[in-house]
Image (spheres, helix red, strand yellow):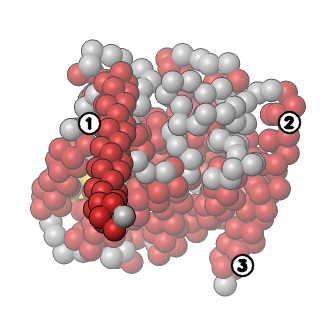
Amino acid sequence: MFFLETAISLFIGAFLLTYLTIPKIIGVVEHKRLMDDPDHRSSHSSRTPTLGGVAFFYVLVLALFVIRDRDLFDEAMYIIPALTILFIIGLKDDLVVISPGAKLLAQVFAIIFILINPSFTIHSLNGFLNINEIPYYLYLIIAGFMMLTIINSYNLIDGIDGLASVVGIVIMVIYTTIFYMTGEYFFALISITMNASLMAFLGFNLSSDKKIFMGDTGSLMVGLIISILTLKFLALRPTSYTELPFLLENAPLIAISILIVPLFDTARVFTIRIANKKGPFSPDRNHTHHVLIDYWGLSHKQASFIIGCFNLLFVMLFIVLGSTAKNMGMVIMLVSVVIVLGYIFFKYNYNFATLKQKILIKRKVDRIKSKVEESNLSKRKKDRQKPEDKEENIEE
């Protein structure tokens, strides 16, 4: 009962704080002219306010203060400095672009605060691929790499209106359910808080007159929260999994399925960039959401909704399979899906110049087809009029 009351209060409070703060942020950003200027890669055509993630920061800090008594290992005191580091580095990157190396270094420092807390230590993979106990140093390497991957993967999908928010909402709903079922109420409340902020932000992100982007300020912090929740999920005690609808050994695969959208998109984009002899962090329009918009003609809302639905259905499928299937069968299933998706989207393995050329050619072909159809239609009309003219001449 206490959890339900706290959860409702946190959700309403976080939603209202975010919803009421974002218009103020938009006003300040417009007044100081800190808008995001569109370039050749942008999916928007007008200058748009950024820094929407500023609202996430103080809402999360306030929520952690309120629920600090619910944590067992003082996790809130470790999460706050990690959030602060990424908030500062994200804010600086939104205002003055910084190098990927400096951003990565800041992420490493933020992650250290999380890894040294004993609550997040992964002691065993519980038989996944026949791996059980793992040494502490190996945990640090695996967990650190995993958190860096999740943070940057989520940061990279923030490319069109609504996508980062929709994917984040799906992930938070799943983690809220998992941590509620396992009795980890502190992390369930964090998920609820983040979910409320993302829902409030989504309305502005999709708005036509009060649009704002979360920017790196927001995407880095949301990515950090997702990585923390994922790490905690994998560090759960074996007894906690008795309440979950899947086998203990399948937990790593369930985590991958939850994060399938950012992980798949990042792997695909990095592969294409390296194949084109570019740096993995070099910007382009090769992301999955760009393909859906540029080549398949979907709107931002449609692409975000489709990707979000795919994420949710993919997780549900793996939870159902994970309740009975052994992890080797799950691995084969996951690899098969990735190969199929890779084949579908790797057909669009092009750099921006090639993409633009294909789009222009497609538009020219469509215009030619429409002109031909109009010409044929006008000829048919003329042919119909000729017999009528002949009849009039005969009568005369």
Residue position for label 1? 348
Q: Residue drawn 70% across and 23% down? A: 95
Q: Which amino acid does label 2 sit on?
A: Val
Residue 333 seen by the camera: yes
The relative height of residue 294 versus residue 180 in the rendered view (above or below) is: above
Q: Do the residues labelled 2 and 3 touch (CB within 8 Å)?
A: no
Towards the viewer: 267 or 191:
267
| Residue 29 on image: x %, y % | 80, 34
Residue position for label 2? 28
Towards the viewer: 54 or 9:
54
Mark 1 vs 2, N-terminal side: 2
| Residue 198 on image: x %, y % | 63, 56
Disc 2 secondary structure class: helix
Identify the image quadrant of the N terminus.
bottom right
Residue position for label 3? 5
Image side of residue 171 versus residue 375, left or right: right
Q: Which amino acid does label 1 sit on?
A: Tyr
For the image, the number of numbered tags is 3
Disc 1 secondary structure class: loop
Disc 3 secondary structure class: helix
Q: What residue type is labelled 3?
A: Glu
Q: Residue drawn 65% across and 76% down? A: 3
